[in-house]
Image (spheres, coloured by chain):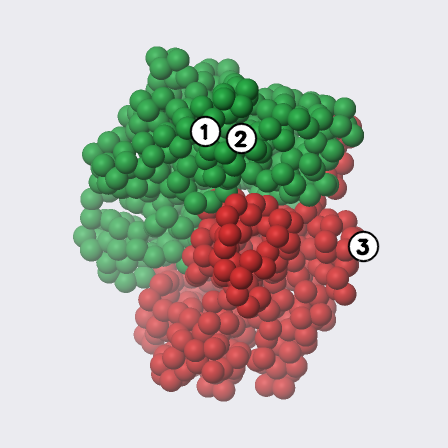
Chain colours: A green, B red
Amino acid sequence: MFQDPPDPGYDVPARIGDPLSKVFTPALVIDLDAFDRNLMRMKRFVAARGLRLRAHAKTHKSADIAKLQIESGGAVGICSQKVSEAEALVRAGITDVLVSNQIWGEARAARLARLAEHAKVQVCVDDPAQVAQISAAAVAAGVEIGLLVEIDCGARRCGVQPGSEAVTLARLVDASDGLRFNGLQAYQGSLQHIACAEERRVAARSAAKATKTTITALREAGLSCETIGGAGTGSFVLDADLGAVNELQCGSYIFMDADYDRVSEASGERPGGMENALFVLTEVMSRPVPGRAICDAGLKALAVDSGLPRIDVPGLRYTGASDEHGTIEDPEEKLALGNRLMLVPGHCDPTCNLHDFYIGVRDGRVETIWPVTARGKLF
Amino acid sequence: MFQDPPDPGYDVPARIGDPLSKVFTPALVIDLDAFDRNLMRMKRFVAARGLRLRAHAKTHKSADIAKLQIESGGAVGICSQKVSEAEALVRAGITDVLVSNQIWGEARAARLARLAEHAKVQVCVDDPAQVAQISAAAVAAGVEIGLLVEIDCGARRCGVQPGSEAVTLARLVDASDGLRFNGLQAYQGSLQHIACAEERRVAARSAAKATKTTITALREAGLSCETIGGAGTGSFVLDADLGAVNELQCGSYIFMDADYDRVSEASGERPGGMENALFVLTEVMSRPVPGRAICDAGLKALAVDSGLPRIDVPGLRYTGASDEHGTIEDPEEKLALGNRLMLVPGHCDPTCNLHDFYIGVRDGRVETIWPVTARGKLF
């Protein structure tokens, strides 16, 4: 029904050239000017420091944005967090992917090996059993897969302990068929969200020390690290100063979010001067009583794990999200039915994963529509 | 690449007939036996009480499940929360939809009117300006759209005040071209999550009283209510006892979740005996240190707005979600790499909206794979 054949534009919330006022809400909107500035800020940063950037595509899951990061933004390739996410991006033309995560299972390892027929592929490990599975899959497919040994440099999530444990695993990788030992994964995820600047510095120094100790131990064992990957948006300036990593894995820098803004404000340090480029456009669809407006963006349009979205209009506050509604406190009665707001999401990555399209806007008009290529690619 | 033409099965995490052990993780799994029992429990309940069921499809967003609810589960039709969600379900064969929410905008009203050419369509209003837009769209399309006037019966979200405000709006609907006044929307959403049984009873009584007062006022104004819609999974037994609503709008009953379980336990009242039928299957992909296991289901596979998922295995606790990782405390060292767990999601509706497919399992094997038809249909 509706169309025969179905019009693929029917489920897209906007058309190229539309004014912002015509975009169906809620919609995931990119301020393309701010986006371009963030892209260039990071490009200049890595160039000035002599570092590589491997932009994290888990943030945006978009092949179009990944290509821009590689072609114009100084990135050597991308990170991905899941094999199916990497597959979607490689199918869309990306040719250099690090799965910056552990993977498990013969079937998944076989998919990774198949992917390596089409792109340069690397993956992280923190256990000999993973190494064995990936080696077997690489041999069966006749490909070589690059491995990074992940160390736990303070985040207490994945990773072997720095030092001798890492050396033992690196030796196994080096001795395994179909694999190439490429270096270390030394990402300290919890650094990103430490609001106290001094505390973050202490934690970053500790991560850098653990990483350097491990590099030295590997060198003594005759193993060199082509890549030492790490650093997120909240810590990349600090990590670059400390000099332990040579390949930055920032993702959120391209968009930023309300949680990063809170950390920046609390610490007085804005990482690299990055600015908000991602918004959820919403509309007031109910104005039931004085002081309260209800908008059309709730839990299914905004991830709230790191807090509710922010409204950059004095006197307005987003105070509650239900599945399809957002409650806005409006004591000064500023809002009427149909009024539109640009919400700054609490957490950019899982918010992007809720949407099918980015609506890229410049000068108040829709300039680009990019699909969220790897949305929902979970395994 | 990969396939030419692309194999659509490549992004599906399972195949019919696979044992559960072969499903790629994380995956959204339905225990079909529990699902069938929930379906029948609700069917028997509404039949015994002489009530109608209009199952809420915002929970599952699946045309297959909606059809089962209508064809086997005693439902007269479905609720949907957004126009684009309703469109996706009508395109897949559903013929009776209430958009149980306000809508705004001429373009959106035009889409709703277009939908009414293909299905019986109703929508809620709480403002004269919405009525004018929908009336104009219905007239332009030459269709009739059924309207429910939403009253705020305690949830403090959308809705006019019970009593005379509702009567004024209902009169306007009744007098508008292209519209049919069908009754009231009297859903008290916050009832669902009140853990204290007595407190919930008080709130439910207050909602029922407000609803009945409004029905009487409408009758005195010469307006009769064919439909009084309301009642969610946490309150439908109570709401049925109180007798104010005649069309139940339960959605979560078909799946349940950890938050409903917490409320049920705290209050000692399990609504209708419904049981957990929805799980996120996850796998341990890192086992870095004694006592800690990392699984592959994080924020992008599980909604955490109503709490972290539950693991029904003594000694194991899911203690932290990052984007693609879940941290599991395992002090007794039960878990090894590759071990699989069925997580009970904290909140079923937004969890389903993260996935593209339901993997229906019976006797340990994949029996059905249902797409999440209206996933991400936000506007």
Mark 2, residue position:
A167
The one of A107 and B303 positioned closer to us in this rendering:
A107
| Distance from Cα at disc 1 to Cα at disc 2 | 7 Å
Which dot, 2 or 3, sits closer to the camera? Answer: 2
Report the disc number at residue A214.
Answer: 1
* Residues at circles 1 and 2 in contact by the CB criterion of under 8 Å: yes
Report the disc number at residue A26.
Answer: none
Q: Position of residue A347 (x, y in %)?
A: 39, 43
Report the disc number at residue B17.
Answer: 3
| Quarter placement of the N terminus of chain B | top right
- Taking the image as shown, residue B168 lies to the left or right of residue A168, namely left
- Same subunit: marks 2 and 3: no
Q: Secondary structure at mark 2?
A: helix
- Of the residues shown, which amino acid type is indicated by label 2? Val
The one of A306 and B170 positioned closer to us in this rendering:
A306
Residue at the spot 58% in from the left edge and 33% down from the top edge: A169
